[in-house]
Image: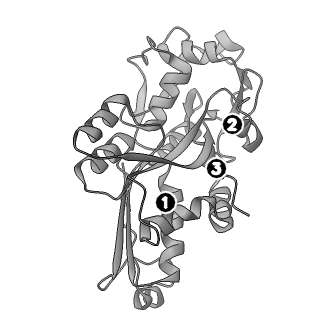
Amino acid sequence: MNDTLIRTSALAAVLAGGIVFAAGAAQDKLVLDGSTTVGPIAKAFAEHLMRQDPAINITVSESGSGNGAKALLNGTCDIANLSRHLKGAEKEAMEAKGLKPVAHVAAYDALPVVVHPSNKVGDLTIEQIRDIYTGKIANWRDVGGFDKPIVVISRDTNSGTYETFAELVLGKDGKVAKTAEYAGSNGAIRQRVQKTEGAIGYVGIGFIDDTVKVVKVNGVAPSVETALDKTYPINRELFMFTNGEPAAGSLAAKFLGLITSREGAAMVEEIGFVPVPAKK
């Protein structure tokens, strides 16, 4: 998984001519860690605030949802980005240390199922996807496709994206086939699928493009509308967690305030996710 350090200063902006990675002391700082899915939202928010005030320093790392929860527990981040809710054990561990985890919904998402553009399969049921991922279905001809072995691509098991997929598709007792390949990010899955004719994968809605083919699930295509009304069956909320509510006027409060601002909603939508309704 990639760790991305985002920092800024006015001088660095001039020298770099683009997004800057900081120099100089900051008057205020914020550290975020966690989900590679939520990462692009966090980076966009960070860049927005740092353009407004070059004195602040915001670091965004993408070590996965599970590691984000650990970072919040250990006090090594101010905001944990998770593409799933906290697990019971994670919440209990935090409370045992005196933490008060607060969930902030950052955006809504669907998990599109993607295949190679040459694949003629355009619709799969949840049951068929489950059978593909557990190894019961191993050839595309069994679901109306070409006679070619299915190459199963999954997110790594520390990923919140994986855990959402496992909960909503695999079910409590479902286990990914031993022959499956694991990828460390949404982008890695997309890259593998676009280069492999027999591949199938799943990514956040913000990661789909014309290099892969999105299949319908139970007859419903993933979209902003079907993510919000939950008619697309593989949908989820994306979270940012803090230890208690941030103090009014703090950098964390300003950062999280972007979620329901018009500017923040525009950033989330531009990235490809579904924004939380903006405050009027």
179 shown above or below 237: above
170 shown above or below 226: above
Mark with earlier residue (1, 3): 1
Q: CA distance from mark 1 to mark 3?
A: 12 Å
Mark with earlier residue (2, 3): 2
Residue of label 2: 213
C-beta proximity under 8 Å, tags 1 and 3? no
Q: Amino acid at mark 2?
A: Lys
Residue of label 3: 273
| Residue drawn 61% across the image and 42% down it | 109
C-beta proximity under 8 Å, tags 1 and 2? no
Q: CA distance from mark 2 to mark 3?
A: 18 Å
Task: Give the x, y percent position of residue 246.
Answer: 42, 61
| Residue drawn 46% across the image and 32% down it | 162
Q: Amino acid at mark 3?
A: Phe
Comparing marks 2 and 3, which lies closer to the viewer?
Answer: 3
